[in-house]
Amino acid sequence: MKPILRILLTEVNKVKISVFGSGYVGLVTGACLANLGHEILCVDIDEEKINLLKKGEIHFYEPGLKPLVVKNFQKGRLRFTTNIQEAVDFAEAIFNCVGTPSREDGSADLKYVFSVAESVAKLAKDHKLMINKSTVPPGTAKKCQEKIKLINPDSEVEVVSNPEFLAEGKAVHDFTHPDKIVVGAKSSKAYSMLRKIYTGRVRSYIPFLETNWETAEMIKYANNSFLATKICFINEIANICDRVGADVKLISQAMGMDYRISPKFLNAGTGYGGSCFPKDVRALVSVANENGYKANLLQEVNHLNERQKKVMVHKLLQRFGENLSGKTFTVLGLSFKPNTSDIREAPSLVIVKELLERGAKINAYDPIAFPEARKELGEGINYCENVEASAVGSSAILLITEWDEFRNIDFQNIGSTMQEKVLFDGRNIYEPEMLLEEGFEYFGVGRK
Ligand code: NAD
């Protein structure tokens, strides 16, 4: 089936929707769709999360999400439950937004996705759409549909694939201003319900791509794998720059001026992290393997990214020697990127663990991610109140996540409280000359 590009005009058609999974994607989906006027019931098996949500509290940080949740909750358009039967009964359309984590072998673990499909198969009494928004390998919608038919041969539940492209840190904006909406389905009834749900998602128009299940599922993997590859590519260039004395920042700018390349995702750094790129690249490699194809490029992207997370550690060891006992280092930024509390697969975790293993003490500061970081790193590091406190007695600052507040640090002031004035700029956000003027040794990524 050929994708069809459609332009949607704004107009609200209220739909009763249940959203399974109240995590980053589910809650943003629920809140944004409620804000469009739909009636939303968010369901999660985690009672603690649902109880928090009922009190207007969110278990993670996402800019702009809390006011949207509170407003729509107060208007009665957004409700929360742990009752699966209630959620199935309520809805015409069910969004499946549960997690699809990596298994040990890299493949996507689909047990949560299938468990929702099984619940819907058992409990649905009439026609409903079950819309997979989770990122899943091609073939998953088909398997869900088969499972549903196996459990209940008379089931009228229709599976749809509708991958989500939002990015944490600007998820509300991305959801309401998407580049595209991709829908893989089997019937015109399903496409038209999705159009009804999304009508009004942006002010003027949105490209709406209609295709089959497998293509929709594959678009999401292709999208994420390409972005991961682009980051990996510029990191590769940066590593070469480090050795030949070239400046990757200028190279990125120049490359970005080529309209065929675009400047986005061309910033060299400490590697990508988060809950999507790493697991999605691994899952696509695994899908390829299962289908008799060795996806060498993507396998190498995954491998290179893990290596990149340690580049800063190697530079630090070259400067300070292998034994770091008795030394304190300042880590700025723990979340995998700015404006999120998410630390899943964050480069900071690898870097901190490497330094701790070599006897270093860590003073860390992050504006938001301490609760998540504590779960991962325990009390083995000092969680500092601010940048100034984290720098006292430190032998070097390691900038790992480029939160805005790190862009205008008073280096003269904090330098005077440090043991040695050394900066590892893992995101190339500072001008080396400025740091040199303040008496700092500067180590960037791909720039001398
Ligand atoms: P998450 O871990 O934050 O949330 C998943 C939620 O599902 C959890 O709260 C969990 O308790 C709940 N859950 C599990 N089983 C359930 C069930 N049977 N019924 C109801 N709830 C259940 O995950 P996330 O980051 O929101 O990601 C969800 C999916 O969306 C993944 O496939 C991910 O790859 C994809 N995705 C994520 C992002 C992102 O930026 N986080 C962006 C696009 C797509």
Image (cartoon, rainbow, N blue to C red):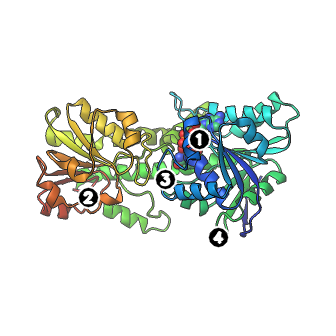
Q: Which residue is mark 2?
A: 246
Q: Nearer the viewer, mark 1 or mark 3?
A: 1
Q: Front-most of 212 and 373? A: 373
Badge 1, how many Cα within 10 Å: few under 14, some, many 20+?
A: many
Calculate the distance from the C-alpha at mark 1 to the C-alpha at mark 2: 52 Å
Q: Which residue is mark 3?
A: 62
Count of numbered circles in the view: 4
Q: Which residue is mark 4?
A: 203
177 left or right of 258? right
Q: Nearer the viewer, mark 2 or mark 3?
A: 3
Q: Which residue is mark 1?
A: 50
What SS does tag 4 mark?
Answer: loop
**Amino acid residing under circle 3:** Glu
Query: Residue at the bottom extreme?
Result: 204
Q: What residue is drawn where x is 20% and y is 35%?
A: 360
Q: Earlier in the sequence, mark 1 or mark 3?
A: 1
Q: Position of residue 276 (x, y in %)?
A: 51, 44
Please report contact status of discs 1 and 3: CB closer than 8 Å, yes or no: no
Q: Earlier in the sequence, mark 3 or mark 4?
A: 3
